[in-house]
Amino acid sequence: MIEMLQPTDLAHALTHDRADQRARALLNLGWETRPNALVNDLVTADDVQLARRLQANGIVAGKVNLADYRSCAQLVAHHGGWLSAGGKAALLAPFAD
């Protein structure tokens, strides 16, 4: 079932603000980490949820399909360092039964 976009989600997409940029970076596998940084900016649950809504509504296709378990599991396996604990949980939550 497709979750309808909220007005704030549409505003994020139309203005390409920071939330939209983070969601698009996740979907396009373009999350930037700095190898020598003390603290990296990690993918949060909010980033995953917005990315999933944007993809489900056809606004951003992306390189990873967040509706597919295999794609999400590969994202965790290959880029687990990008994900906060909440981000990982949000990514895999739809597939937990």
Image (cartoon, rainbow, N blue to C red):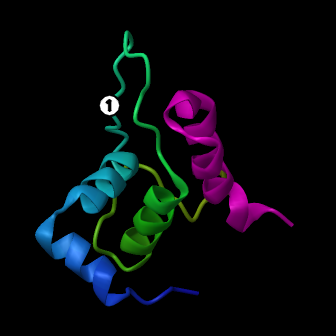
Q: Residue furthest front?
A: 38
Q: Which residue: 87% across, 67% down?
A: 97
Q: Which residue: 42% across, 28% down?
A: 40
| Quarter of the picture holding the N terminus | bottom right
Is residue 87 toward the left or the right of residue 26 in the image? right
Q: Position of residue 51 (x, y in %)?
A: 41, 63
Q: Which of the 4 image quarters holds residue 91?
A: bottom right
* Residue annotated with mark 1: 32
Q: Is residue 87 positioned above or below 67 on the image?
A: above
Q: Depth check: give the residue in front, 18 or 70.
A: 18
**What main secondary structure does the magenta stretch of the protein show?**
helix
Q: Which of the 4 image quarters holds residue 77?
A: top right
Q: Residue furthest top?
A: 36
Q: Position of residue 55 (x, y in %)?
A: 39, 69
Q: Depth check: give the residue in front, 40 or 90.
A: 40
Is residue 16 toward the left or the right of residue 68 in the image? left
The question of residue 94 being in magenta is answered with yes
Q: Which residue: 22% across, 71% down?
A: 13
Q: Is residue 32 positioned above or below 24 on the image?
A: above
Residue range highlighted in magenta: 71-97
Q: Which residue: 44% across, 24% down?
A: 39
Check disc 1 and give the amino acid type: Glu
Q: Position of residue 12 (x, y in %)?
A: 24, 71
- Classify mark 1: helix, strand or loop: loop
Is residue 89 toward the left or the right of residue 46 in the image? right
